[in-house]
Amino acid sequence: MKTKTATRVRWTVVIWLLVGGIINFLDRTNLSIAAPDMMKDLNLSNTDIGLMGSVFAWSYAFMQLPAGWLLDRLGAKKVYAWAVALWSGATAFTGVCTGLTSLLFGRALLGVTESPCWPGGAKITASWFPKQERALATGFWDAASKWGPTIAPPILVALIVPFGWRALFFITGAIGLIFVVIFALFYRQPEKHPRISQEELDYIKAGGGGTAQEIGDSKVSWGALFKHKSVWGMILGFFCYIWIFNIFVTFLPLYLMKTQNVSMKSLGIYASIPWFGGVIGAILGGYISKLLVDKRGAKPLVAKRAVISVCAVLAGITVIIIPHAGSLPATLACMTVALALMSALSSCAWALPGDVAPPSMVASVGSIQNFGGYFGGALSPVVVGMIADKTGSYTMAFTSGGIIAACAALCYWLLVRKPIAE
């Protein structure tokens, strides 16, 4: 088998998935930027904004498993393209909403239609990359989950200041529609791509890529996965992570405006700074885990659990400190450190299914972890909104969120102790 190929078309596929993922997060994040103006225009409360975040997360969670089934049944290109088109329509629909009821419907529709994005990316990667390159390829496009919130604030603020919050949703919806037209016209499976060389195609197929193959039957049934402590540890631990992650996604810009007197014009820069910590933390988390294996001789499962547990505790402490930070620089520093630690936790948590699950059920265990995380974590935006409305402060919300985030250490370290035996 050749290690070098005449063409490297497969790496252009990573760009498709990265751009699609960034657009996905732009359309998730636009609510947090538009929230202050929407609250004034439509007489909405913090609880209403939190409820919209929770409705999105619940619909997104419920559709995780059906989305995977549709991708396998109908093909990645078709389902992925339809998903982008539909979630772009849901984004644009938000711009015409006139009250809470229609806004909740729009956010629910966004959650349903955005659900195939990440499993679709995983399926496309499996087709285009040999097994030995999939982790590296996935790492590049999965960074969209951090790059999206990083670049979203300056882009979205630049749109909302001159055009208003309604135009913000119209424009971001249009960006997705433009992307999906280009994707539908030019994306091809490896065997059908006009620019791929035979050498590269042979290289992909030799490593298990190319046309989708049947997965061998496992001795463990899908339902039996829920009998294992390791699976429940991953579900509960990811719930703790998503709880605090959703708070940042929904309330970070609003928190800076209300507690640090950041203006709308300056919000784009300040709200993006903490997410750079997320980008760096995601890379460092995987690197430190690998270092523990290579230099300290730790088993891969133990190394990941160790990184997750330490980062969870430190992230929890940092989140509790945020409302007591005082100045804007101190607040941004705490938020940046917290998101770096949380992202390190997340990157290792997404790598755990490969260590815990039977080879034929890695995707199932990963989707169960993600479903559990978003199903429970969907409560956090509405809870934070209610606390903020009731107390007039975010202190209690961040304190409780920090405690919950730290509990991820208990879940992953005490429960995720051994692989599932076939």
Image (tube, rainbow, N blue to C red):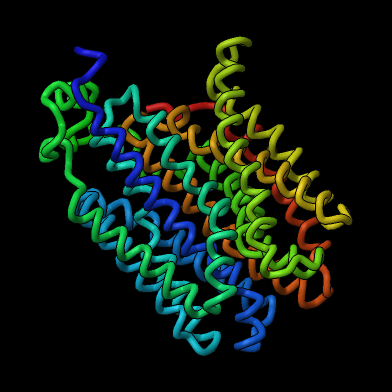
Q: Nearer the viewer, residue 138 or 69?
A: 138
Query: Which corner quadrant of the image does residue 379 belong to?
Result: bottom right
The answer to whether 184 is drawn above or below residue 389 in the figure is above
Q: Nearer the viewer, residue 37 or 122?
A: 37
Residue sitting at 55 percent across and 28 percent down? 286
Query: Quarter holding the C terminus?
Result: top left
Q: How far from the left and from the top, in percent, is residue 174?
A: 36, 69
Query: Quarter holding the N terminus?
Result: top left
Q: Nearer the viewer, residue 14 or 317?
A: 14
The answer to whether 39 is drawn above or below residue 58 in the figure is below
Considering every residue shown, the one lying at the far front of the view is 162
Residue sitting at 66 percent across and 45 percent down? 339
Q: How far from the left and from the top, in percent, is residue 138?
A: 40, 36
Residue sitting at 42 percent across and 71 percent down? 171
On screen, residue 175 versus residue 289, left or right, reads left
On screen, residue 43 versus residue 116, left or right, reads right
- Total marks placed: 0
Query: Which corner quadrant of the image does residue 177 belong to?
Result: bottom left
Q: Nearer the viewer, residue 185 or 61?
A: 185
The answer to whether 412 is drawn above or below residue 390 in the figure is above
Q: How far from the left and from the top, in percent, is residue 421?
A: 42, 27
On screen, residue 60 versus residue 10, left or right, reads right
Residue sitting at 75 percent across and 39 percent down? 313
The answer to whether 23 is drawn above or below residue 405 in the figure is below
Q: How far from the left and from the top, in percent, is residue 146?
A: 54, 47
